[in-house]
Image: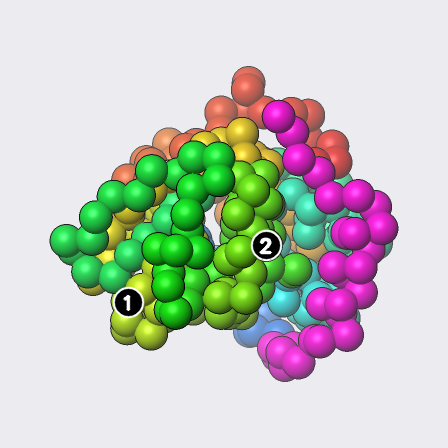
Amino acid sequence: MTFRLSFNDFAFVVALAFTALATVIPVRANAGDITVFAAASLKDALDEVVAAWQQRSDARVRVAYDGSSRLAQQIMHGAPADLYISANERWMDVLEKASRIEPATRRNLIENRLVLIAHGKLAQPVTITQGFDLAGLLGNNRLSMAMVEAVPAGIYGRTALTSLGVWAAVAPKVVQSDNVRAALALVQRREAPYGIVYATDAVAARNVTVVGRFPPETHPRIVYPAAVVRGSANASAARGFLDFLTSAPAQGRFDHHGFKVIRPTADKPVGGAG
């Protein structure tokens, strides 16, 4: 089963997120540096990829991590990014339609899974099926999620819970964060007993257990596209780093952190809409 936001729903999401924009646009790095705007869920793996790149290149890379929606908003407002890596195809579509990326450079890099986590290492497993009683499991407690109308992890989570027929009962118990790592932190600190995050976030986390995995058919495929930002002052270096992201050393690090690497032969044509 395939789930897609309608044009009107998606336009509303974009408009709402743009209205709420409060993040400060960063200052351009030194000449020759590559500035990458990347989804927060990539941090552990991408930090290792950047370290591997630095061993073979004089072009320095600095990465700004945040929710894909916030980063896209900054690029729309002229932030000096050279490369954008999103946690879903929709926000990349927004930038492509606004002519803010170079479509010919766009490619899908990796995939992820959506999971239900609980605080602690002895949490009991939860069977995620149609109509499962997540609201009853929460009781008077909160479910930690990324923003469900703007951040990819939150959008995927709400779609999955809606598909399973439990969103209406759970929605009043949801506490929303600016990005998926912030949602994860609430569970780590026991401020929320359960949360919905990516599988790779759970791998990197302390004091949490994956208690259930959402069936892939309950939400859109979780794909991370990347593209060079139009007008980049270091477009050539950015293209070089983007190529490196699909190299064996980089793919090995993504694999290690639990991502599924998308091989070029299995990917859709570069530049296509998601």
Q: From the image, tell me which residue sits under label 2.
A: 168
Q: Nearer the viewer, residue 240 or 224?
A: 224
Tell me the quadrant of the picture where the C terminus can be found: top right
Query: Where residue 72 sits: x, y (%)?
Result: 67, 61
Task: Report the front residue among 143 and 181.
Answer: 143
Kindly report which numbered mark, 2 or 1, lies closer to the viewer in this rendering: 2
The answer to whether residue 20 is magenta is yes
Q: Identify which residue is drawn at 68% across, 52% down.
A: 91
* Secondary structure found at label 2: helix
Callout 1: SS? helix
**What distance separates the C-alpha of mark 2 from that of mark 1?**
26 Å
Residue 230 visible to the viewer = no
Q: Nearer the viewer, residue 68 or 215?
A: 215
In the image, is residue 167 part of the stretch drawn in magenta? no
**In the image, 198: left or right of 73?**
left
At which x and y percent is residue 145?
A: 48, 61
The label number, if any, that marks residue 180 in the structure image = none
Point out which mark residue 188 bears. 1
**Foreground: 134 or 248?**
134
List x then y, in percent, for residue 109.
52, 37
Residue at x-position 71% and y-position 38%: 4
In the picture, residue 125 is in which quadrant?
Answer: top left
Magenta-drawn segment: 1-27
Q: Residues within 10 Å of mark 1 (few under 14, many from 20)?
A: many
**Mark 2: few, some, or many residues within 10 Å (few <14, many ≥20)?**
few
